[in-house]
Amino acid sequence: MSPWSPLHPLHLFLGLIIWSAWLVFLYGGLSVACEFAPPGVEQGALTWINAAMFGLGALVSGFLLWSARRCWNAAPASDSDAATGRFVARIAAAVYLISALAAFGLVLPGVILHPCIG
C-alpha cells in the first residue's frame, strides 16, 4: 500500500505532525518578523504580520480539512476484510479534523492582538 493512500497507517499521526510543524513555523516566523520588521503599536491588530498569519493558517487548515475529507471518503464499505482500512481511515479523518481546528485556533489571537507585544 502506498503511503499516499488514505488507508495507510501513516495518516494516523500525519495531521499532528503537520500541526506541530505549523506551530513551530508560526511562532518562529512571528519572532523573526517582530525582530526585524515590527509594525507600529498604533496599528493594533491590523498588521501585515497578522494578515500573513491568518492567510497561511487558512491554507494549512484548508489542507488538513481536505485531508480529513479524503480519508473519510476513502473508508471502504462495511466488508469484514476491509475493517482495518475503515478503522484507519476514520480515525485518520478525525485526527486531521482536530489538527485543522487546532491549526486555525493558533492564528485566532492575531484577530484581536497586536503581534509584537513587549
Image: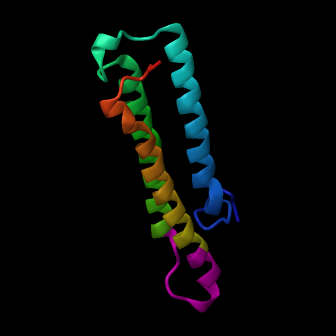
What residue is rendered at 41% in x and 21% in y? 49
x then y, percent, for residue 75: 52, 74
Residue sitting nearer the eye, 41 or 14:
41
Residue occupying the point 57% across, 53% down: 15
Query: Residue 112 falls in which quadrant of the image?
Result: top left
The secondary structure that dominates the magenta segment is helix
Up-down relation of residue 88 to residue 59 (above or below) = below
Q: How did the renderer colour the structure?
A: rainbow
Left or right of 25? Residue 106 is left
The residue drawn where x is 70% and y is 65% is 1
Nearest the eye: 88 or 52: 52
Please, which residue is most extreme toward the front here? 118
x, y percentage for residue 3? Answer: 68, 57
Magenta residues span 74-87
**Nearer to the camera, 85 or 33:** 33
Residue 55 percent across, percent down from the top left: 38, 32
Q: In this view, does 107 lie to the left or right of 79?
A: left
Residue placed at 37% from the left, 39% from the top? 108
